[in-house]
C-alpha cells in the first residue's frame, strides 16, 4: 500500500488478556519500529527491526511485551497479561534507509 | 539519559501571528533532528528534518527550523500561522550513534484562532 497500515485501529480488552497488534510497513522498507504514545506524551520507542531480526529491543518495558517480524515485512506486537497501564496508542513506523520514519495511524489499546 | 524538551505544551495564536516552538535535546554527539505534526484525527507526518549542512531548514507548509548546535536547540518557526495549522507538533532526535530510534519530546498543542 501507499503508507504504513495498522490493525486494529481500536482494541478494547480486559485486564489479564492477551492482545496482538499488527503493522504493515511500506512495501520495500527494511526497517520497522514500534512506539507507544501515552496520553499527553510523545511517542516512546519500544523496538526496532532490521529485516527479520530485532536490532534494538531496549524500549520494551518488560517481558510481557514481545514483537516478531518473521518474513521481514509485517510485524506483530504481542502483549501478554495486559494491565491497565498498557493503555496507550501503539504506533508503527517504517523506513527505507533514509533515516526518515513514516508512521502509521496507530492502534488505540484500552485495557479495562 | 538522552531526552528532548519541548517547553511550550499549549500555544494559542490568532491567524497571521508568528510562531516559534522550542525544542532542546540532551546529547553531545551528532544528531539527526525532526519535527513531526499530527493534525486532528490523522497520523504523524514529517514537517522537516535536519541531517547536516545548512542549519536553517525549510519544510512543508511554510515551516522552517534552525539548528543551533551550541544551544542544543532545533526551534520550529512559521512567520504567519493559519487556522489549518492547528495540530500537535513533536520534536524528535535520532542520536547518530548506530541506533535508529527516535527520541520524542512531549509535544506542543497549537490552536490557531480564526
Image (spheres, coloured by chain):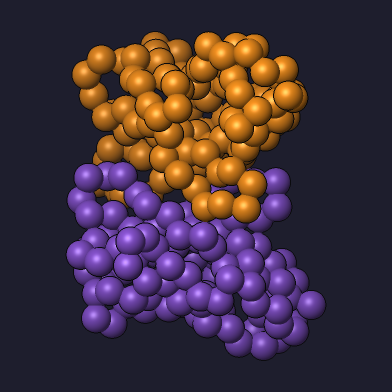
User: In the image, is residue B92 above or below residue B22?
Assistant: below
Where residue A102 appears, as percent x and y from the top left, is 37, 52
Q: Within the image, what quadrant is residue B74 found in?
A: top left
Is A17 situated left or right of B91 in this image? right
- Residue plotted at (35% across, 49% down): A101
User: In the image, is residue B24 above or below residue A84?
Assistant: above
Where residue B27 appears, as percent x and y from the top left, is 40, 30
- Residue plotted at (65% across, 77% down): A11
- Residue plotted at (58% across, 83% down): A19
Where residue B101 appears, as percent x and y from the top left, is 37, 50
Which chain: orange? B
- Chain A visual colour: purple
Q: Nearer the viewer, residue B82 or A53?
A: B82
Q: Can see residue B92?
A: no
The C terminus of chain A, quarter of image = bottom right
User: In the image, is residue B99 above or below residue A22?
Assistant: above
The N terminus of chain A, quarter of image = bottom left
Furthest-bottom residue in view? A17
Q: Nearer the viewer, residue A76 or B103?
A: A76
Amino acid at each position: 500500500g501507499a503508507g504504513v497500515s495498522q490493525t486494529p485501529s481500536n482494541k478494547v480488552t480486559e485486564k489479564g488478556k492477551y492482545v496482538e497488534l499488527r503493522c504493515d510497513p511500506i512495501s520495500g522498507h527494511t526497517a520497522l519500529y514500534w512506539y507507544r504514545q501515552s496520553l499527553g506524551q510523545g511517542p516512546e520507542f519500544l523496538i526496532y527491526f532490521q529485516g527479520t531480526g530485532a536490532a534494538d529491543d531496549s524500549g520494551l518495558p518488560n517481558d510481557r511485551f514481545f514483537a516478531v517480524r518473521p518474513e521481514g515485512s509485517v510485524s506483530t506486537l504481542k502483549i501478554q497479561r495486559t494491565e491497565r497501564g498498557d493503555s496507550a496508542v501503539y504506533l508503527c513506523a517504517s523506513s527505507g534507509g533514509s533515516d526518515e520514519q513514516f508512521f502509521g495511524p496507530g492502534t488505540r489499546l484500552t485495557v479495562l | 539519559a538522552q531526552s528532548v524538551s519541548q517547553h511550550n505544551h499549549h500555544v494559542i495564536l490568532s491567524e497571521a501571528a508568528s510562531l516559534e516552538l522550542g525544542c532542546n535535546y540532551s546529547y553531545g554527539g551528532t544528531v539527526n533532528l525532526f519535527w513531526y505534526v499530527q493534525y486532528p484525527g490523522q497520523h504523524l507526518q514529517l514537517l522537516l528534518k535536519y541531517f547536516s549542512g545548512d542549519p536553517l531548514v525549510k519544510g512543508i507548509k511554510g515551516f522552517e527550523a534552525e539548528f543551533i548546535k551550541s544551544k542544543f536547540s532545533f526551534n520550529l518557526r512559521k512567520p504567519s500561522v493559519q487556522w489549518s495549522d492547528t495540530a500537535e507538533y513533536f520534536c524528535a532526535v535520532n542520536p547518530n550513534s548506530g541506533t535508529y530510534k527516535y527520541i520524542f519530546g512531549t509535544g506542543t498543542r497549537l490552536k490557531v484562532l480564526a
